[in-house]
Amino acid sequence: MRSILQSGRWISRYFPACWQCRNAGSFASIQEVSRLQDKKMRSVLYPVKDLEKIMSPSVDRSNFRLYDPPVEEISAAENLFIPSRKHVIDYISSAVRGDHTPDLQQPEVCFIGRSNVGKSSLIKSLFALVPGIDVRVSKTPGHTRKINFFKVGKAFTLVDMPGYGYRAPEDFAEMVESYIQERHNLKRTFLLLDSSIGIQHADLIAVEMCEEFGIPYVFVMTKIDRSRPAVLVTQFLQLQEFIKTKTMGCFPQPFLVSSLNFSGIHLLRCFIAHVTGTLPKIS
Ligand SMILES: Nc1nc2c(ncn2[C@@H]2O[C@H](COP(=O)(O)OP(=O)(O)OP(=O)(O)O)[C@@H](O)[C@H]2O)c(=O)[nH]1
Ligand SMILES: [Mg+2]
């Protein structure tokens, strides 16, 4: 099997340096990541592998890497997140009510979670190769007040939701519930949890909503750059157990991300391409 490092060389060969890689010092593009040492590259692309190393060998790992695409596929998916004249990536519009949303046909994925968990930051880092796109993040919880739509060419739409919990909009439940229940083109809901805190009471309500409406959803553990490894492992295993015992519609594998250092972001781009059926073919 080709090592990750060799795959990195493969990427440099087929994806020569390009304008979007000028964001030097960040790992926003796979081109940048491919310059890292093998070990570091693996930890940015597949963060769960780092966790596995510090887990007891007796832990059941069967669901950890159900979605485990090769680096070539991750690299191909990145092309969807690079804008061009024919493939415009931009903010479309905002809605204050679930039934006031734009009528779009392309597949859609949305990001929900408690206020301040990192929803807008995650979208911002997914779009880090899009110059000038305006995705607003804030230290203050309750910053995103509307449902914000971002188009990725004709491929799919990403939707940033207001957070629940502290400083949530008053009509949050109505806003989000009607969106989730009625959005015919919604392919996946990403439910974000802070990786050092895990599931809170408010998240259980969100889980209940997804389960009741029978929509496919997946957990994303955010801010892994600031979680201590031991805490992260504990939270990850607790979440695995929760998914196994308490959910029906949830994808068994949680994703780990840091919007700060791009760990897990490339894998998530690929997963979004996968669930929206837009992954470019690799020859
Ligand atoms: N260290 C670190 N901080 C993060 C990360 N993601 C988000 N943050 C910080 O967390 C805070 C909240 O981020 P947002 O993305 O605005 O959170 P949100 O979920 O959109 O919040 P609301 O819009 O209020 O619901 C900001 O100060 C971000 O800089 C991360 O991966 N690592
Ligand atoms: Mg936000």
Image (tube, rainbow, N blue to C red):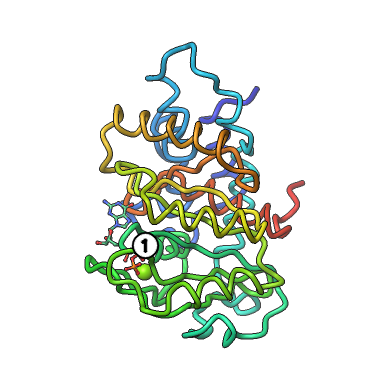
Residues packed near mark 1 inside 10 Å, few (<14), some (14 to 19) or many (20 plus): many
- Where is residue 238 drawn, in percent x and y? 43, 32
Element type where label 1 sits in the image: helix
In the image, taking residue 101 as reference, residue 226 lies left or right, namely left
Q: How many marks?
A: 1
Figure quadrant, ligand 2: bottom left
Q: Position of residue 283 (x, y in %)?
A: 77, 46
Question: Is residue 55 placed above or below 18 in the rendered structure?
Answer: above
The furthest residue to the left: 140
Nearest the camera: 140 or 261?
Answer: 140
Locate the N terminus by quadrant. top right
* Left or right: 47, with 214 as reference point: left
Is ligand 1 less than 8 Å from the beta carbon at label 1?
Answer: yes
Closer-to-camera residue (26/259): 259
Residue 107 falls left or right of residue 135 = right
Q: Is residue 234 left or right of residue 279?
A: left
Give the residue at x 47% y 70%. 160
Q: Residue at x 53, y 75 (%)?
A: 150
Residue beneath the point at 63% across and 34% down: 66
Q: Residue at x 55, y 60 (%)?
A: 209
Spot occupied by residue 243 in the image (x, y as percentages of width and height): 54, 38
Q: Amino acid at mark 1?
A: Ser
Within the image, what quadrant is residue 73 found in?
top right
The residue that label 1 is drawn on is 121
Report which quarter residue 50 is drawn in: top left
Residue 105 x %, y %: 72, 77
